[in-house]
Image (cartoon, helix red, strand yellow):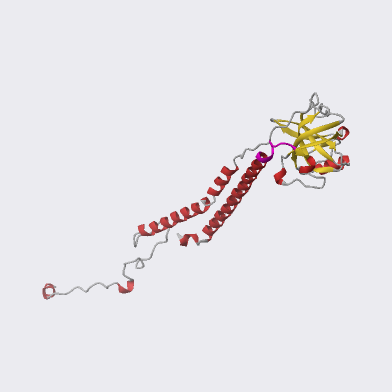
Amino acid sequence: MWQVLRRPRWLGYLALAVLFAVITAGLGTWQWSRHEGRVENRAVVEANYGQTPVPLDEALGPGDDLAGAQRWTRVEATGRYLTDQQHLVRNRPYEGVFGYEVLVPLALPDGSAIAVDRGWVPNAPTAQQLPDVPEAPTGQVTVTGWLLPSERDLGRPPVQGQLASIDLGALEDATALNLRPAYLVLDEEDPAPATRPEPLGAPDTGLGSHLAYALQWWLTVPVGLLLVLVMARREAQDEREGSLEQVPGEQTPGEPPVPVGSRPGSPSPARRRSPRRRKVRIWDEEDA
């Protein structure tokens, strides 16, 4: 079998099998990293989501960044909604339906502001229309909610009064406000308005199927190599059986005729005996 594997054709098969192993191992590692991310997210949500709210400045100062372990920290802040700076975040799903999330800056006593995601509203009947959005409370209001980091910029063209994602940098550019480096997912407002956008649901803490996918990919890592070894072993066995079945001196189909005397076991012309001379007897001479 090892002689078969040293042939150029089989070396190519081995290279493909090694490449397949590297790719499947990488895919398994990628799925494992996603599983670890889900596990970490669940731990953070379970640690923070249901806690008693703390003052915003205690959890996130004006110049602080939101640490990963602080995501979904429940906070409380008091200020005034800047309703003229309201932005709609488009293409946001809620229970399988796409619509908008309503983002309104809340001006804080220190002169900074924090973006508040007040909830979700469905799309208007036509794409040319904007949805009806319940108004935010006027005057001083105390809000309670959870902190989340800014989302990434999707690189979409800017639209007046709209955002493609909750990108706080884009919102800061559009409003010229000094925003805190996190936004607040609204839980409650005091005083409470008569109506408000649909509250966003609790975060998903499911682990998904990433662990199962990782194990599946890792189990397929040796498949290519095993397949090549089995095929090479079978070819080596076929060649060995073929050589044993060939009868000495028997012409194999497809081979050129073997000259007489060159077959294994046949005498060469040089060694072939000449015909023996017939003896002449005395009575034969007399009869003659």
Question: Would you say 227 lies left or right of 267 here?
Answer: right
* Residue plotted at (70% across, 45% down): 69
Q: Position of residue 131 (x, y in %)?
A: 81, 27
Q: Position of residue 267 (x, y in %)?
A: 31, 69
In the image shown, does 99 or 194 lie closer to the viewer?
194
Question: Would you say 250 lies left or right of 5 here?
Answer: left
Q: Please give the range of residues in magenta.
A: 46-53
Q: Residue furthest top?
A: 194
In the image shown, does 24 or 68 lie closer to the viewer?
68
Q: Is residue 49 magenta?
A: yes
User: Which secondary structure dominates the residues rendered in magenta?
Assistant: loop
Task: Work out whether 264 lies above or below 189.
Answer: below
Q: Position of residue 263 (x, y in %)?
A: 35, 65
Q: Quadrant of residue 166?
A: top right
Q: Quadrant of residue 16?
A: bottom right
* Residue plotted at (54% across, 51% down): 221
Q: Quadrant of residue 241?
A: bottom left
Give the mark count.
0
In the image shown, does 273 or 52 lie closer to the viewer?
52
Is residue 267 visible from the viewing direction of this image? yes
Is residue 165 visible from the viewing direction of this image? no
Q: Is residue 203 magenta?
A: no
* Residue plotted at (45% across, 59% down): 1
Quadrant in which the C terminus is drawn: bottom left
